[in-house]
Image (cartoon, rainbow, N blue to C red):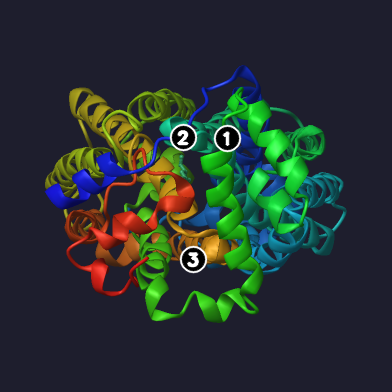
Amino acid sequence: MLQEDNAQREGKIYGGKVTPLVLVICLVAATGGLIFGYDVGVTAGSTSSNEFLRKFFPSVYIKMKCEMDDEDGYCRFDSQMLTLFTSSIYMAAMVAPFFASSVTTAYGRKASMILGGLVFFVGSFLGSAAMNIEMLIIGRLLLGVGVGFGNQSVPVYLSEMAPTMLRGALNIFFQMAITIGILVSSLVHYSTANLEGDLGWRFPLGFAAILGLIMALGSLLLPDTPNSLLTKGQNGKAKELLQKIRATEEVDEEFQDLFKASEAAKKVENPWKNITQRRHRPQLVLCILIPFFQQLTGINVVMFYAPVLFKTLGFGDRAALMSAVLTGIVNVLATLVAILLVDKLGRRFLFFQGAIQMIICQTTVAVMIGLRYGSTGEGFFTTTEANMALFLICAYVAAFAWSWGPLGWLVPSEICPLEIRSVGQAINVSLNMTLTFAINQSFLSMLCYMKFGLFFFFVLFQIMMTIFIYFFVPETRGVPIEDMKRVWKAHWFWQDFVPDY
Ligand code: BGC
């Protein structure tokens, strides 16, 4: 591992400073994360409106009302049909990145961001105006397409725009926007939960349109990245932009590296075939395993089911919703910690620290639930125990928010050379969404079947992902994005896959 640190220190340091312009550009681009975050929140909240369920899912509504009292405590909320509906967004988002990657490569990152925002806007509009289930589902699929385009292009945009020494922090603006989106969504649901009639569900769905519009209009004002401009053959414009965002004329070295990368990318006929070549094995493996492990931390169990979880632990209806708002606030604040530390302590430190904290918190909660609720799900927590569980769940969310959450978007977007960056990110997004879908779809049945053991299931994966990071994920802090090859060359395992240069 020492070898890797040396490789990083010996790497290039480009001229230029962090300018207010680049900060503003990255802030605007990161708003693309809002739409994803809002949808994670909507997934959690859509079951909370009785009016919504009565209108679109009457059988689920009746089942919920009748069976509340006489089922196994772990199985009360299991309803495949409703989760299938909420998951539909992730199904669309699994497929969309593959199309987004072609748009992003051919027309630039900005084009995908604008398109993502617009499609999301239309989808929210349709959903909130839905008169029947068809409209609702089409709206939801469009939301997924918007998210697929946004998540494919925004992290790459941020990593390309940012100066090397601050790439981690600026990229994590994206995760920050995700967490703000989740929080806003839970606040909107909290405050509309008691509205009479359709407004209680139409308003939260319609509110999303504003976020889509912010993303589309914001992106319209942004320049494309220098890397995208070079790919489109606009070399002069690319250099000018680089000088502007780095606030110096001395950008030759960085520009040359970008130029070389874009020339290499132009020679590639099929990036999908290209990424499967042996020399790109480290990137391919990481773009597959990082989203896989990110979702198997179990984070979305808390994000989607926090109110249900807190209700099961004995909190009242409103207290349960309020606790979900609390985890949302912790999520936002802890992401700030990642922004401050990622370029100082590095990615690997955060990966390790976060995972260890998640393992401790989730194991303790699982043991507590196991002791109190046993295998029947019948039992109760004392107030002190309930508060302790709430504290542990918040500490778990915080750990995710400064580790696997942001790094799950940052690392895949910075490890791929330009020629496979778009497809690498498409794989990352698509797998992330597939796993999100699978967890959303199966969590309630798994809880019903595995009881409190389900939490140990996630702990097992947290241990595996920590071992994986230790052996296979090198430190990328401070390494220029188009100079990443040196990191693989210095890695004990990956060096044999990467040709000399
Ligand atoms: C993950 C989402 C998750 C969110 C929580 C993101 O990085 O991809 O699945 O809901 O973090 O903040």
Q: CA distance from mark 1 to mark 3?
A: 36 Å
Residue 83 in sight in this render: no
- Mark 2 residue CB less than 8 A from any atom of ligand 1: no
Name the mark on residue 251: 1
Q: Separation of disc 1 and disc 2 at Cα?
A: 7 Å
- Residue 82, by quadrant, is bottom right
Residue contact between numbered discs 1 and 2, judged by CB atoms under 8 Å: yes
Q: Earlier in the sequence, mark 1 or mark 3?
A: 1
The label nearer to you, 1 versus 3, is: 1
Q: Amino acid at mark 1?
A: Val
How far across and down, in percent of the image, does residue 374 sit?
A: 16, 53
Point 27% across, 31% down: residue? 395
| Residue at disc 3, secondary structure | helix
Q: 75 left or right of 374?
A: right
Q: Which residue is mark 3?
A: 431
Please give the residue where the numbered disc 2 appears in the rendered image: 14
Is 31 located above or below residue 232 in the figure?
above
What amino acid is at disc 3? Leu
- Please name the residue shown 78% across and 57% down the image: 107
**Tag 2: amino acid:** Tyr
